[in-house]
Amino acid sequence: MPTKPIKTSQRVFEILEAFETQQRPMALKDFTRAFGYPASSASALLKSLVTLGYLDYDRFSRTYMPTMRMASLGTWVQRALFGQNEQVLRLMQRLSEAYGETVTLAAQSDLYVQYVYLIPSRLPIWYAVPIGTIRPIARSGSGWAMLGVRSNEEIAQLVRRINFHEPDPARKVSLGELMAHVEQGRRDGYVFNKHTLEPGAGGICMVLPERRFGRLFALAVSGPVERLEEKEADVVASLRAGISQMEAGGPGPADRPAPSA
């Protein structure tokens, strides 16, 4: 697993994510109460972010607020992930409208898969993971799909690295078991993982044809396994049609009546 983050860096992002969640100016006491920070440490950290230009401090209300410098930091990310014409984002929106399930975009990050964007489900018993969540690539449906485009030797090397860094013998990866999932995905052209994240949950995953900055990406429609099994063929057909349009480099398919969720 990844090493534990440095405390100071963790607190910086907890503060920034708190603003994203609350969407309002926040006072020192909000952070000390929410995260249990010592008041002196929290005050020093907030003042540093003000000095750097990422937060603004209002002396009358004694509250902090992100500046436009903070807002501009990630403006390039959407273009980098989705391209100028945002075909990936439009495909995700169509899948969400058609099936109502959680739609995720995941990227390979060395030995892990990271969820970089998602559209949450509108249906009961919904399934989602927070953006930024990472999972071992050998234990993820999106990971199995992405490994399918690698050579068998590359996969074997990756498994050796995973097992070298895994101290728990019970969690070491079996190359044979992993290859069974990968080969199934290669034959089918997609991966339907079931009960890998938690009992009852699953996802139907496909790799995107375009690599951005050398990274592989996979789309998945995720939700309760029983519900996904009922619409597996429709989801797979929609993923294939959307990805084919992306490979052709043309505009996305015209909107058509969505199948019932």
Image: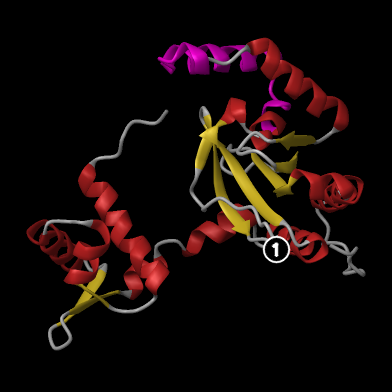
Instruction: Say which residue appears at 64% left-offset and 61% top-offset.
Output: 119
Residue 145 in the image: above or below residue 33: above
Is 242 left, or right, of 86 in this rendering? right
Is 49 left, or right, of 204 in this rendering? left
Instruction: Say which residue appears at 74% left-offset and 23% top-offset.
Output: 181
Instruction: Say which residue appears at 29% left-offset and 79% top-offset.
Output: 25
Quarter of the image where the C terminus is located? bottom right
- Please provide percent x and percent y for residue 191: 77, 34
Return the residue nearer the eye: 104 or 125.
125
Q: Would residue 208 be seen by someone viewing this image from the given angle?
A: no
Q: Residue 117 is drawn in which quadrant?
A: bottom right
Q: Residue 180 is drawn in which quadrant?
A: top right
Name the amino acid, label 1. Asn
Which residue has dot 1 on it? Answer: 85
Instruction: Say which residue appears at 70% left-offset and 63% top-offset.
Output: 85
Q: Secondary structure at mark 1?
A: loop
Q: Is residue 158 magenta?
A: yes
Return the residue nearer the eye: 82 or 172.
172
Q: Identify the magenta region.
A: 146-171
